Amino acid sequence: MTVGGGAGGAPSAFDPKKIRMYGLVGSVVGIYLGAILNMALNTNVFSFVGAVAAIFAVVMGANSVRRICAYGIGTGVPSIGMLALGMGIIAVMFGLSVAETLGFGLLGPIITLVYAGVFGYIIGVLANKVIKFNIPVMEEGNADLSMAGAMAILGWSFAVSGNLGYFDIVKNVLMTGYIAIIFIAGGLAILHPFNANLGPDEKQDRTLVNAIMVSGIAMIATGIAAILTQGLAAGLLQLVIGFALWFYFFKMYYKLVKRDAAAVVGTGLLPPTVQ
Amino acid sequence: MNFDINTIVYILEILVGGLLVGIGVHFVPVGGAPAAMAQATGIGTGTVQLAAGSGLTGLLAAGLMMSVTDNLWLILASGAVGAGIMIGSTMLTGSWIYAYAVGAPFASAKVNYDPITGFSQPPYVAPGTVGQGIPTICFVSGLIGGMMGGLGGAMIYYPLYLINGNAALSAMFAIGIFLVNAVLASWNIQGTIEGFHDPKFKKWPFAFRACAIASILLALAAVLITGGA
Amino acid sequence: MDAFSMGLIAAMGALATVAGASEDIESDVGSQSNPNSQVQLAAQVGNPHRIYNKAISGEPPANALWAATAAMVAYTLITAFQMPALFALVAGASVAALFNGVFAISAYFGRNSSQRRFNQWVYLDIVRYTTPSIMAHAWITSFCIATISYIMVYMLPIHHPFPMPIIALIWGLAVGAIGSSVGDIHYGGEREFQNRQFGCGLNTMLSGQIVRKAEAGLRNSIDNAWFCTKFGGPATGMGFGLTVFLDNWRTTVFDPVTQASLAIAMGIFFIIVEVFYNLYIEKSARRKYGPYPEYKGDIAA
């Protein structure tokens, strides 16, 4: 998109390094926490922890979309979200499958993360060196994006299957086709926040709150999916938590909109200065 | 899994598929946002979107064909034709809008004469624009691009399905590989291109290199994945 | 080939036509995708407006989300609760429409408040009366596409091997790509700029000078949908309908197991016909409209 968009290096209140750390640690710890709780207590009600963990990754991804796209990449924001998820899905299947083959099912998220990080970095290098973008944050941003996409898909896949085992994920998430909704809802959760707030007066906190809000929507979707794979209780719990998250952050988003907008009016003609 | 000669063939097939997608994107005449205002020649949408729309329609056709036969050529042809029908219908109905709603003759500002029909272009370019509509050269180029995308999608899907025997997994994986290559190629184009007659088309070796490296990495990961259940 | 599957193909074609039309009108009511860049630009060049600004990621991913959501919910209800397919599809489309509403509202809020320095206001009445219209069109789109996926997976003689939500995702991407390539031109090339000469593309000088006033009062997005319904929507419908119908027709008439090459040859025949039809349109447009009078060079060939 050529119009709108801040100048190079969008101003931000939160440091990207901090967001990356919270995003990675939050999502990995969350996914493991959910998996271990589910396994130890032999239940699946803790699947929602994985879905919440994915939100950390989404916030990280949304922030890195914001950083890359502030330079203007000439093809619009959506392409980069699709790239994130394209890289993510391959990393997830690779990580889980290799971990299963090696016999350490629980290593899956780590292998996924490493593959996603390395692959994203290489894509960034390709973009800068071969395609000659010369955007300084490209390598770093693409590594972030790839990891965020992978962790979001992994977190929500876990939320749907209730188990990190590769075969369970294939059976519950892929064979049912739920991967489609995880894929596209995750993609939109990463790319929509910056796209929806594009403009010269874009604010980081508003964009990130939008990311959490959209993740809440995605969690509602995975909750519906989990009703089939894990039964009514686990699914509904996820759905309700997703709805609560969405509701809370939608209110917060609306508050930020009222703070940032030139005016929020019930109705009216065009603004007086230009009429 | 055991590593044998077949694995190398699979990797090569995925690589070729990824390259077909990456190069095919360069053929699709996309004008981006300006084309939607009849300000530039081509289809009024983004590169990735159109390539994904047509290539994945081809993937649907290829997937259907693969469920009843394992003849590689039939599957590839199905993918290409499915994608070709999608992109052909899109450009045709787009032409209706340019001709009957915007009321503009089709013209390209990048060439003086349409290489296929020989029509002169500059008199028909509206002032203040860089052409509009979908002249025959762009239509043919778009068909080639769309069909290459479909062919690439099928080419990626075929070895994946042979490796893991799981249609859903292979389909999602093919979508992933497809999107990575399409996005890299569209970054190379930087938004808009008119087809193979456009000077920008000469940039394709960059995308070729980038897509080759990316596809190899993806293929190495892909052949290690087992089918699961 | 039997009469029943031929009927199903016809139904799929019809559903796809409706889906394409409603998809395009949805994107016009909300002002999405490429023409929206001009709506976005309008405020920046000093023309604040009262047009919706639904920037949801470009049409293909957005429509893929609605379609996949509808298919996912329908699949869950059919499999987990053995609900009748039609009811499940309706429920799925409703969930998709709700999602659509949330995304649309957040995009309108976000884009407009990011234009604070251009004095672009956020009008709540626009949100209240335009969003339901957007959601309604998204409902139709996602219902039709989820139904097409259902037919492909469960009802056609050769069941498609992909799961229903993945098929819906792919058709959603396709319908979005067609909607943004076909119908949006009617909105962006004609409706947004009715204040300039007819018969040419938008002059770059006029970028951002969109029409902001209607016959009476200020133009809003519902007026735009009224206009685009007349041609842009149906043409998009034809585009998507042709895609779905022709693609499935050839594999149903010709059995893919025994007559695969005939099915492929039929597809190539369709493509060639399309090339010549486009050539005919190009020729007739050049003949009827003629060159632009501003052109100063020689007119040859």
Image (cartoon, coloured by chain):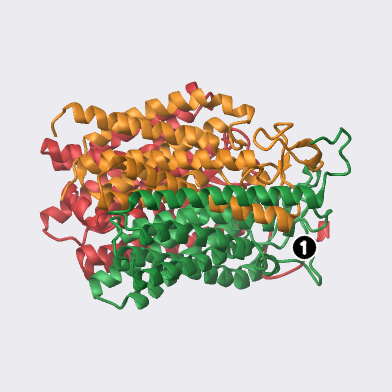
Chain colours: A red, B orange, C green
Residue for badge 1: A270
- Say which residue appears at 28% left-offset and 49% top-offset: B66
For the question of whether residue B18 can be seen, the reply is yes
At label 1, counting other C-alpha atoms closer than 10 Å, the crowd grade (few under 14, some 14-19, many 20 or more) is some
Q: Is residue C298 above or below residue C22?
A: above
Q: Position of residue A246 (x, y in %)?
A: 42, 62
Q: Position of residue A35 (x, y in %)?
A: 19, 51
Q: Quadrant of the C terminus of chain A?
A: bottom right
Q: Position of residue B164 (x, y in %)?
A: 20, 43
Chain for mark 1? Answer: A
Q: Nearer the viewer, residue C23 or C112?
A: C23
* A40 left or right, relative to A77: left
Q: Nearer the viewer, residue C277 or C104?
A: C277
The single residue placed furthest to the top in the displayed view is A129
* A45 left or right, relative to C251: left
**Quadrant of res B71:** top left
- Say which residue appears at 38% left-offset and 32% top-offset: A120
**SS assignment at label 1:** loop
**Quadrant of res C29:** bottom right
